Image (spheres, rainbow, N blue to C red):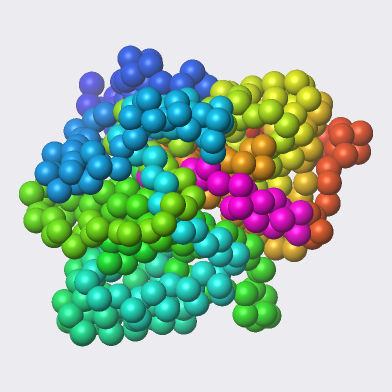
């Protein structure tokens, strides 16, 4: 027997491959995942020996609700529970708001509150930050004024020019006695040993999220921490699309792609929700659920009545796809307009059906995506959805000036969301993401103004001309769409 295997080593490996593949297929079927994702995974397991197993390992495994991401209850800590209880608004109070600022968004508020204990907060001063320059200027100013703590959580932090400026600010804060803690994603970030040693030397605590050995090889590995969060002294917070990298600063340097992004500064009670979500991941990366929580993490805030904000967080540790469900709810309750800006438009069936139904019912749906983007596969996968979206009556435009990385949506000029979640499978189901849901006319109007400004650098896709694109392009789109649930 062993001699036969030695003489027929390739067939032997093939047999082993399919034995393992059958085990994986059994796991996929038993796990009752999304049918399209299951079929895509099964296709590659069967059609591509060896390679299919690698693809499945990095893209197909589903850890939601597993021991790896055991949910850490934010209410298990008395201090967090106390602030959540104080921030929660009763069902009766929500109904009273129905004719005020929430109108028909009450169901969305309840949805997130029941899904993820996400309270609606009303006392928030919001500042919309367009592109990296304004974002970093604002962050630098707030870091310089920090007095108690600075908590950061980033998908990408590089020790390049802008990264070292941030590190300088963090080191300076630590030297004047401010507590500084940093979570960085092991795959997305590229912090040198020198930079890490420099921070640790002044007392900065930093932990990598799910460390990997070969980060370049696992560039698209599953379950990455795609969030961008800063919490300063418990009452100032940041989230949005801007990572800490020179790529996000438009210096005009030759060969550098123009980067269009949107970030949000929050001052007020919603920062407490950001703080809670940051603490959850800090417990996870430090492997300690019993770390002390200082009173100063949740300070008293005497803000005047301001914008209403709800923080939606999702990831493989949550029981529900919170951000996707919130977006779905916003789309299905829209009355006259939906404006979406996203770098990757690879919607699941629920979002795709909701958008097409909204458009066919007379709602003005307009989707803005980058013309080229930074991923060949994602670009063609996105384009595969254009024709059916256009045929439903929706509008799609290409941003031609550079990389459009903003992740925003405005519905009916009254509701908006800004955050880290793309309009794709990976953000909805796999990565750790965080968005601010904003019930405020002023922010919605500011985002609408920016949307119109972005359209000045865009080209609308016309259905008749789009339908005449080459067969080669259509094949690329169809091929990449097969990968859509795995991208």
Q: Residue at x 36, y 63 (%)?
A: 236
Residue 406: image quadrant is bottom right
Q: Residue at x 23, y 46 (%)?
A: 83
Count of marks placed on residues: 0
Residue 265, image x and y in percent? 46, 62
Give the quarter of the figure containing the N terminus. Answer: top left
**Percent from the top left, x then y, of residue 367?**
71, 42
Residue 17 position within the rendered picture, expressed as x and y whole percent measured from the top left: 36, 28
Residue 293 appears in the rendering: yes
Give the answer, above or below, for where 154 lies relative to 9.
below
Q: Judge left or right: residue 83 versus residue 31.
A: left
> Which contiguous range is marked in magenta?
432-453
Q: Closer to the camera, 10 or 44?
A: 44
- Horizontal side of residue 81 vs 30, given as left or right: left
Residue 28: % across, % down: 37, 21
User: Which of these two is toward me, 92 or 110?
Assistant: 92
| Residue 9 visible in rendering | no
Task: Look at 35% across and 81% down and name the residue there.
Answer: 144
In reply to whether residue 399 is colored magenta, the answer given is no
* Residue 170 sits in quarter: bottom left
The residue at 40%/67% (across/down) is 157
């Amino acid at each position: 027997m062993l001699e036969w295997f030695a003489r027929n080593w390739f067939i032997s490996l093939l047999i082993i491959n399919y034995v393992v593949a059958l085990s994986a297929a059994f796991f996929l079927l038993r796990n009752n995942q999304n049918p399209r994702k299951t079929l895509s995974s099964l296709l590659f397991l069967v059609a591509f020996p060896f390679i299919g197993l690698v693809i499945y390992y990095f893209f197909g495994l589903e850890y939601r609700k597993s021991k790896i991401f055991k949910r850490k209850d934010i209410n298990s800590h008395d201090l967090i529970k106390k602030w959540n209880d104080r921030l929660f608004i009763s069902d009766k109070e929500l109904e009273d708001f129905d004719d005020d600022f929430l109108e028909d968004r009450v169901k969305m508020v309840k949805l997130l509150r029941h899904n993820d204990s996400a309270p609606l907060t009303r006392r928030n001063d919001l500042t919309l930050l367009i592109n990296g320059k304004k974002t970093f200027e604002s962050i630098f100013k707030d870091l310089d004024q920090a007095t108690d703590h600075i908590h950061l959580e980033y998908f990408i932090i590089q020790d390049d020019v802008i990264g070292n400026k941030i590190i300088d600010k963090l080191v300076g804060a630590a030297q004047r006695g401010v507590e500084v803690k940093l979570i960085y994603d092991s795959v997305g970030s590229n912090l040198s040993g020198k930079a890490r040693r420099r921070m640790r030397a002044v007392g900065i605590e930093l932990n990598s999220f799910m460390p990997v050995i070969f980060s370049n090889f696992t560039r698209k590995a599953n379950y990455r921490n795609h969030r961008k969060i800063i919490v300063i002294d418990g009452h100032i917070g940041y989230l949005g699309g801007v990572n800490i990298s020179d790529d996000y600063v438009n210096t005009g340097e030759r060969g550098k792609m123009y980067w269009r992004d949107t970030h949000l500064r929050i001052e007020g009670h919603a920062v407490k929700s950001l703080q809670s979500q940051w603490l959850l991941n800090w417990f996870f990366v430090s492997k300690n659920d019993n770390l002390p929580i200082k009173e100063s993490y949740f300070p008293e805030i005497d803000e005047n009545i301001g914008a209403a904000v709800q923080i939606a967080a999702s990831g493989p540790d949550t029981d529900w796809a919170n951000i996707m469900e919130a977006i779905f709810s916003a789309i299905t309750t829209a009355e006259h307009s939906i404006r979406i800006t996203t770098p990757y438009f690879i919607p699941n069936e629920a979002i795709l059906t909701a958008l097409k139904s909204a458009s066919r019912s007379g709602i003005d749906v307009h989707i803005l995506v980058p013309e080229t983007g930074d991923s060949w596969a994602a670009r063609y996968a996105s384009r595969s959805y254009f024709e059916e979206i256009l045929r439903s009556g929706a509008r799609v435009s290409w941003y031609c000036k550079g990389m459009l990385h903003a992740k925003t949506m405005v519905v009916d000029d009254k509701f908006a969301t800004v955050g880290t979640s793309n309009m794709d499978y990976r953000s909805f189901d796999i990565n750790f993401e965080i968005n601010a849901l904003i019930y405020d006319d002023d922010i919605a109007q500011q985002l609408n103004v920016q949307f119109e400004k972005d359209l000045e650098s865009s080209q609308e896709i016309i259905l008749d001309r789009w339908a005449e694109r080459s067969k080669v392009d259509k094949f690329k789109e169809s091929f990449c769409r097969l990968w859509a649930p795995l991208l």
